[in-house]
Image (cartoon, rainbow, N blue to C red):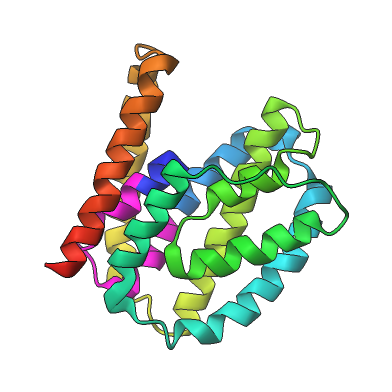
């Protein structure tokens, strides 16, 4: 989630705003799908089926809204959204049989407009009694499906061009390289130091988007 937030906050200005969401989705799709493949034995297919029900509905409801979305204010919306997820922790939602389908709807619908909604899934899955590996892979599988729906919607609506695909491939390669470097550096940085530094960085990037919108 952290990498996705940083990436999408840096992309405005480099790509057309209407293509920002699907390009970000393609890059994140590569990252999350590879994580799922590496941890396939921990995948909870029962939760995937439940998630798909809500995700399909979220896609159907959200797709028509994309056509009327004012992309010129997207940096402002992204900036505010990033500050909210950085400073206001989401409540831990209690489990019910409708929880995962609701998550599918909410996450896909939000992702169509703000690109990132991973922390929403974390709040929903808190009470699902998953072990560490199941939680990581389940979150990655939900993100994979979310980005697939996002790319599909923007492609069908003609907002994702072939030239955007080439750019996304370049960014994806850079992101994979960044992930590798980050993995090497992460073991050298303490958890105590990492969290405040990351929160500060995300806050600066969110404020940058908001200020840039008004300039």
Q: Which residues are magenta?
A: 6-26
The single residue placed furthest to the left in the displayed view is 215
Q: How many marks?
A: 0
Q: Quadrant of residue 41?
A: top right
* Image: 23 above or below 204: below
Image x and y of residue 109, in percent? 58, 69
* Image: 127 above or below 52: above
Residue at 69% across / 58% down in the picture? Answer: 103
Image x and y of residue 33, in percent? 56, 47
Residue at 32% across / 49% down in the picture? Answer: 7
Is residue 71 on the magenta stretch? Answer: no
Horizontally, is 81 left or right of 205 in the view? right
* Image: 117 above or below 201: below
Q: Quadrant where the C terminus lies?
A: bottom left
The single residue placed furthest to the right in the displayed view is 97
Q: Looking at the image, which is closer to me, 84 or 153? A: 84
Image x and y of residue 74, in percent? 33, 70
Q: Main secondary structure of the magenta part?
A: helix
Q: Looking at the image, which is closer to me, 82 or 38? A: 82
Image x and y of residue 36, in percent? 61, 41
């Amino acid at each position: 989630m952290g990498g996705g937030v940083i990436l999408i906050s840096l992309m405005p200005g480099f790509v057309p705003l209407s293509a920002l969401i699907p390009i970000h989705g393609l890059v994140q799709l590569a990252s999350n799908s590879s994580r799922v493949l590496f941890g396939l034995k921990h995948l909870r297919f029962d939760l995937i089926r439940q998630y798909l029900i809500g995700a399909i509905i979220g896609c159907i409801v959200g797709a028509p809204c994309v056509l009327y979305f004012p992309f010129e204010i997207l940096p402002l919306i992204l900036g505010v959204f990033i500050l909210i997820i950085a400073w206001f922790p989401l409540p831990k939602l209690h489990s019910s049989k409708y929880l995962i389908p609701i998550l599918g709807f909410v996450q896909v619908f939000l992702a169509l407009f703000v690109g990132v909604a991973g922390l929403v899934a974390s709040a929903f899955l808190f009470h699902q009694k998953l072990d560490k590996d199941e939680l990581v892979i389940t979150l990655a599988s939900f993100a994979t499906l979310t980005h697939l729906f996002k790319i599909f919607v923007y492609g069908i609506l003609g907002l994702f061009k072939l030239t955007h695909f080439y750019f996304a491939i370049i960014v994806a390669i850079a992101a994979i390289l960044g992930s590798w470097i980050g993995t090497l550096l992460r073991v050298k940085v303490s958890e105590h130091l990492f969290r405040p530094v990351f929160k500060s960085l995300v806050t600066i990037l969110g404020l940058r988007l908001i200020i840039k919108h008004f300039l």
